[in-house]
Each structure stands twice: as structure tokens, then as C-alpha cells.
Amino acid sequence: MLRGTAGLAALAVAGSLTAACEVSINHGKSGSGPSSAAAAGPAGPTTAGDPYVPGDGNGGYDVQNYNLKLNITPDASTELTATATITATAREQLGRFNLDLTGLTISSITVDGRPARQQRAGSELEVTPAKELAKGAKFTTVVKYSGTPRTISDPILGTYGWVRTSDGVFIACEPSGAHTWFPANDHPSDKATFDFEVTVPQGLTAIANGEPTTPVTGSEGGGAPGLPGGPGGGPGGGESPGGGAPNGGPSVVPAADRRATTTTTWHVKEPMATYLATVDVGRFAVRTGKTANGKPVITAVDPSVPGVNVDAFAKLNADVIDQWSTLFGPYPFDSAGGLIDNAQVDFALETQTRPVYGAFGLQPTVVAHELSHQWFGDSVSVGRWQDIWLNEGFATYAEWLWGEKSGGPSVQQQFDERYREESAGELWDVPPGNPGRRQMFGRSVYDRGGMTLVALRGRIGEPTFYKLLQTWTKEHKYSTGTTKEFIALANQVSGKKLDAFFEAWLYQRGRPAK
């Protein structure tokens, strides 16, 4: 993720754009579900035990798949009516288990087809099935719910989560905003595949993660057919039926005029952390194509965002993916792309396969940053948020690399400029390998994290450095990784003893020696 707190353009000059989406909401309602028989027995843990995100995640089970059937009507009194079907495996004997869910109204819950009891407190949804779940049992929970997810407004981080735009909805949440719009085990240690069935008012387009299994139509009828039949091109852009704002930008279609609907479906084949899930609804110009290596690319742009050419954005996405594939290893997913919306946010997020960007427009180094996350953060995810530098430090290095490739300062110049800041407390007083909850998306994680990789490259040599990165992305593909594991791999690949080097750069306060 990249985020600017004083404006993206100004921070882009100064260096990396840092921070992220952090959720701390407690407005759920307590209650119970339909009267029914209920199991008695042990409960799974009500948290993943990660001190960086207290209360997030749950234990006792492993989610295999989220199937989300979403009816989204922007600007209606109830914007979301949904059914979440969650397939999971019990890791232990369970008489009850918890899901994360904030707000929203539940109409029913079943486990393996039988009504289950519910109890809610804050962002916890406790589910008691009619029959106890045996260790190793595969079970299916179906939650029917509705409401309008609450937009998160933070005095430091700004607005994020379920963000209303003038013509739809923009969804981007890190680290733990997924449970504001669907029930989940909302922690990256439990990744799962996803299926989306999204119904929206006719004239709007829904873009989600993964690959479309039904045609995706852009604002003027052009767009992406379902990928199983092969991607194709088509015109996009302009206004969708229903009229537009006087200046040619999108306008909100009144809910009363939204009786006709369009449904699209999307499949995420590879495991995905919940915070990387997105569904964006609005009017979009849609382009499809392929990278030089043959990966399908789906690109969408809200035509009301000034100064953004959808074809230039599509080409940039393809070019960056091909470049990173030569350096970081084969692209890990079945499709790529990106989406620029007219959302009034100052951040971008590496939502899996298709990063999303706010209305600040098209900035190539930001695109390079987010697309590098497809390797570092999406395919190889953190199992605990303390290790977030493995995402953001690596993406910052990639951002600097693309800047150098584009004629800007070299990666070494980026390093040297920051190293000269001897009194920068936010850089040297915060160890990026364990920055603490308040600084988990601070400058040290991004800049000092990126500098660690530049220093490592100098220590072991460029060929060995890229061999290390490619080995890392191969060995931890579709899984998680820790800093300890990365250090061990660096020692192994380089044949050097690098523990003291990493200790100085990642865990000690103060400016490390070069």
C-alpha cells in the first residue's frame, strides 16, 4: 500500500508514501439467532493472537473458500444485501467458533444446512452449530445479512474501507477492514480462495479480484469477456446509460431507478488474505489484453478521473508485470491489471490481481509499488503484522527501481539521500522488523525496509540478491513468510552469515553502519 497524508504529489517528491488502513471499530450488536438445538463443547480462540491487530482473526478452523453473493445498490437506504457461504475445516473439536463481523444485520445462519445460534459482541460473531464439529471435519457456514457498511474515517489515515463514490463504491482495507462488509476470519494467516457473484444496478460495472467467469461490460458496452474463453479487447469509457453530471463526470443514479440489474461473477483461484478482497462498483472504461508473457490484463478507469488514459494505464500494468517477472520470478496469478476510481482517498492498495487507486490519478512509481506486492504481500503474505516490512520494504525497493528505470534517481541515490538524514527519528528510532502497532505503516517500515534491501544487494551482489528474491517467492508461493525465514534463506543462498547485518538494519535503533 501507498498512502499520502499531506497529498500524494508532495510526498512523491519527498520519498515513499506511507501508512495503511487500520480498523478499530466496536459498534456491533449482541443478540441470538433462531431458537434451535445447539452443540455444547469447546470454542475456538476468538482472536489470531496478533498484538498488532488485537481481536482480529480467530482460531480453531481454517477457511478454504469464501463464496460471496453480493447485491450492491449504491446510495440506497440499504446498500448491501448478501449471502456469505464459508467453507472451512475444523482444526480442533468445536462446539462453537467465531467470525469477525462489524455492524450489519444478520437474518440467518446455518452450519451444514442446520440453523445455528449466534451471539454478537463488538466485532465478534460467535456461531454455535446444532452439532459439534469434530477435529478435521469440513463444514459450511451460510450467513445471510444486510445493511450499509460503515465508511471508516480516521483522523490520521483518512477515509477508507467501504467508500462511497459519486457513482458507486470503492473498497480497500488494510489491515483488517474486510469484516466491515463480509463475515470472515479476518487475519492474513488464514488465506482462502474466493468466489464473487455481484449484482448491481444496470449501467454500472462491478470489478473484483481474480478472473471473470461472466462477461464484464464497461461503461459503453466494451470490456472483458469471461477469461475461460480467452480475453478480448473492446471499447470502453464515456457515460453509461442513465445520464451524467454536467461536466461529463458520473452522477449517482437514484435508487428508485435501479430496478434493472446486471450480475457478474469472479473466481479467485489462488489463496488470498481477506484484506486484499475488493469489489468496486461504478462507471468504468474497461480494457483487456495480455502481457508480453501472455498473462491476461484487465484494466478499469473511471472516466471522470482527470488526466488518466485507460490505454496508457493498461500498457503500464502489462509492462510492469513483465519487468517484475524477470526479477522476482514468474507472475503468481492467472490475471493482472488495476483500477483507478474517483474515490476521494489518497492511497492505493495491492488488492490481489487488480490493485486499486484513488482519484489522485496515474503515477507510474505507485503502480510499480502496488504490482510488486503481487509477489511480496499477496502471493507471499505475512503471517503476523510485525513482519509488514516484508511487504512494504520490498515494494518500496521496487518503486525506486522503476523510478530508476524511468530516468529518475537511481536506487543507490534513493538510499544515499535517506542515509544522510542522520536525525530522522521516524527512520532510525523505529526498527522496521518490529515497529510496534502505532508505527506498523510508518516511514521506517517503508523507507528503512527498502534501504535494508539495497544494503543487502550491496553486501551479497546483485545476481545473488535476485536469486534470493526468486527463491523466496517460489518457496513461499501462496503461503506466508516471516522475517526469521527470510534471514535464514538469505544466509543459505548467499553462503554468508548475515544475522548481524539484519539485526542492525531491522531490529536495532539508530542508523546502521553502511
Image (cartoon, rainbow, N blue to C red):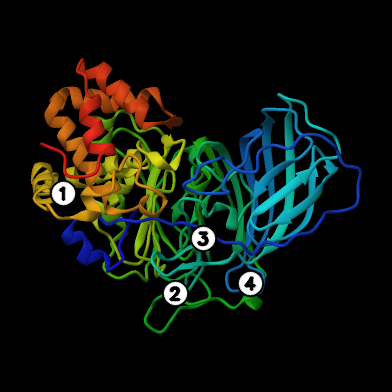
Q: Quadrant of the C terminus?
A: top left
Q: Are dots 1 and 3 in contact, CB under 8 Å? A: no
Q: Amino acid at mark 3?
A: Thr
Give the mark, 1 or 3, whose residue is nearer the N terminus. 3
Q: Are dots 3 and 2 in contact, CB under 8 Å? A: no
Q: Position of residue 123 (x, y in %)?
A: 64, 55
Residue depicted at x 28% and y 33%: 325
Mark 2 surroundings within 10 Å by alpha-carbon count, few (fewer than 14), some (14 through 19), many (20 or more): many
C-alpha distance separating marks 2 and 4? 15 Å
Residue 114 seen in the current view = yes
C-alpha distance separating marks 2 and 1? 33 Å
Residue under label 1 = 403
Residue under label 4 = 258
C-alpha distance separating marks 1 and 4? 44 Å
Residue depicted at x 49% and y 71%: 167
Mark 1 surroundings within 10 Å by alpha-carbon count, few (fewer than 14), some (14 through 19), many (20 or more): some
Tell me, for residue 250, which label it has, or none: 2
Q: Is residue 61 left or right of residue 334?
A: right
Q: Amino acid at mark 4?
A: Arg
